[in-house]
Amino acid sequence: MTIRVLDPRQSAHGDALCMAPPLASLNGAVVGMIDNAKIGTARLFDFIEEILRGEYGVRECIRRRKPDASRPVPTPMLMEMRAADAILAAIGD
């Protein structure tokens, strides 16, 4: 009898990702906010948006809500976020 061992790991594909450089300032910035559809996230984002606008001069917040907390952000929603200078994603538990 032969034992066959499978390796579930995948090798890396493409170029390594790196983080975007930090913004010099949030003043005048557009911030994207992705709500994970859990019960407390909208309230949390209301609070964060108030702080971002009032204390940091954020010009606009683009807020979108995922259809389901357990699934990835839909591609069309991600495309809308391209207009943002920075993006927040949060869990509202």
Image (cartoon, helix red, strand yellow):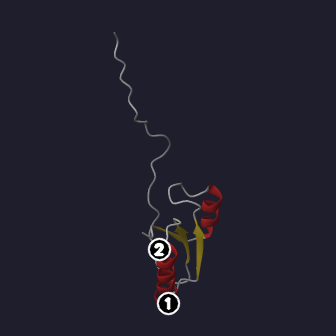
Farthest-out residue, front: 39
Residue 26 appearing in the image: no
Q: Which residue is mark 2?
A: 40
Where is residue 46 drawn, in percent x and y?
51, 81
Judge by depth and name the residue closer to the eye, 35 or 11.
Answer: 35
**On screen, residue 78 above or below 40:** above
Which quadrant: the C terminus?
Answer: bottom left
Judge by depth and name the residue closer to the eye, 58 or 3.
Answer: 3
Where is residue 62 drawn, in percent x and y?
60, 74
Which disc, if any, is residue 14? none
Which quadrant: the N terminus?
Answer: top left
At x 50%, y 42%, the residue is: 14
Where is residue 82 drawn, in percent x and y?
61, 65
Residue 29 appearing in the image: yes
**On screen, residue 51 above or below 88:** below
Task: Compare marks 2 and 1 and give the one earlier in the sequence.
Answer: 2
At x 45%, y 48%, the residue is: 16
**Element type at marker 2?**
loop
At x 43%, y 36%, the residue is: 10
Where is residue 37 drawn, in percent x and y?
53, 66
The residues tagged by marks 2 and 1 sit, at their Cα atoms, a distance apart of 22 Å
**Element type at marker 1?**
helix
Type of amino acid under label 1: Gly
Q: Which residue is mark 1?
A: 54
